[in-house]
Image (cartoon, rainbow, N blue to C red):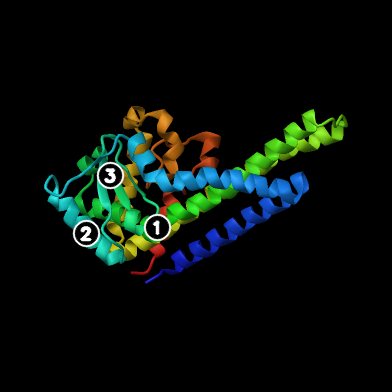
Amino acid sequence: MVTTQGLRANGKIFLLISVLTGVFLGAGYLLGGTGGMIIGLLIAGVMNIASYWFSDRIVLKMYGAEEIKEEENPEIHQMVEKLASNAGIPKPRIYRSSMQVPNAFATGRNPEKGVVCVTDGLMNSLNQEEIEGVIAHELAHIRNRDTLINTAVATVAGALGFLAEMAFWGAMFGGREEDGEMISALALMIITPLIATVIRLAVSRSMEYRADAHAVQIHGQKQGLSSALKKINRASSGPQRRHVNRSQEAAANLFIENPFSSHGITKWFSTHPALHDRLKNIEKTEL
């Protein structure tokens, strides 16, 4: 059953991707005509499609994750199998990361290639009901093919960045001496990637709301996920956060909660919604 919140999130994601595509088409035509637009899309597409195909291996290696064999931990395999059945998807592979901050993420290019990775901190500090809520959230990401959505958004956003940079260097070395052209090119180089970044963050937040709503349906209750998010949020902002490798921050959007918790002005550029907004969304979800 798809929740009202899930349907709204679906609509918002579609609208944001449409806006991003429209910005790309408009900027591409203005900056480089049809040819420049196609070149930008092709270059970004090749890079992001390659990333999409190998994203699971890249991310798992980045976090030093190791597969959990069924004989090592039959309980978590039974838990994941039951929740995957509720979600209507194949049972994903299960990995663990030695990160001490409680967290989890999902990857894999489709439900048949799905992977759920849990951290040692999650397994050691959350109870079974809370772990189930977190895994249900990650299974929702796999079922919703959020990796594919992220790849599509990244492709268009990357193409926008390429076009903006092409316009700037073209204005600088293309024999255009007018100050107005240089200023316009510089403005486009700054503004268009910024627009793309804001839309990418909005898509990511919408996917989190949708996954939270669908997790409630998969798990069959609200308390486990709500309680887990509170604990994870506290831990991500606390002393344990110092043990997180900052070089891994590029993949923060994959986690159920950003382990590199933002403060001050950077919170406006967070990949995840605020905790109180997520809890309200979960509470409104129909069982």
Q: Quadrant of the N terminus?
A: bottom left
Q: Secondary structure at mark 2?
A: helix
Q: Is residue 63 left or right of residue 96?
A: right
Q: Is 246 drawn above or below residue 256 in the view shown?
A: above
Residue for badge 3: 118
Residue 35: % across, % down: 72, 48
The local crowd at label 1, few if under 14, some if 14 to 19, many if 20 or more residues have their Cα within 10 Å, is many
Residue 220: % across, % down: 28, 65
The local crowd at label 3, few if under 14, some if 14 to 19, many if 20 or more residues have their Cα within 10 Å, is many
Residue for badge 2: 81
Disc 1/disc 2 C-alpha distance (Å): 18 Å
Disc 3/disc 1 C-alpha distance (Å): 17 Å
Q: Is residue 73 visible?
A: yes
Q: Secondary structure at mark 3?
A: strand
> Foreground residue, 160 or 213?
160
Q: Is residue 128 left or right of residue 141?
A: left
Q: Quadrant of the C terminus?
A: bottom left
Residue for badge 1: 211
> Foreground residue, 60 or 38?
38
Residue 164: % across, % down: 69, 39
> Foreground residue, 88 or 128?
88
Q: Is 287 drawn above or below residue 210 in the view shown?
A: below
Q: Indicate which disc, 3 or 2, sits on the residue closer to the N terminus.
A: 2
Q: Is 179 drawn above or below residue 106 in the view shown?
A: above
Q: Is residue 198 visible?
A: no
Disc 3/disc 2 C-alpha distance (Å): 15 Å
Disc 3 and disc 1 in contact, CB within 8 angstroms = no
Amino acid on which the number 1 mark rests in the picture: Ala
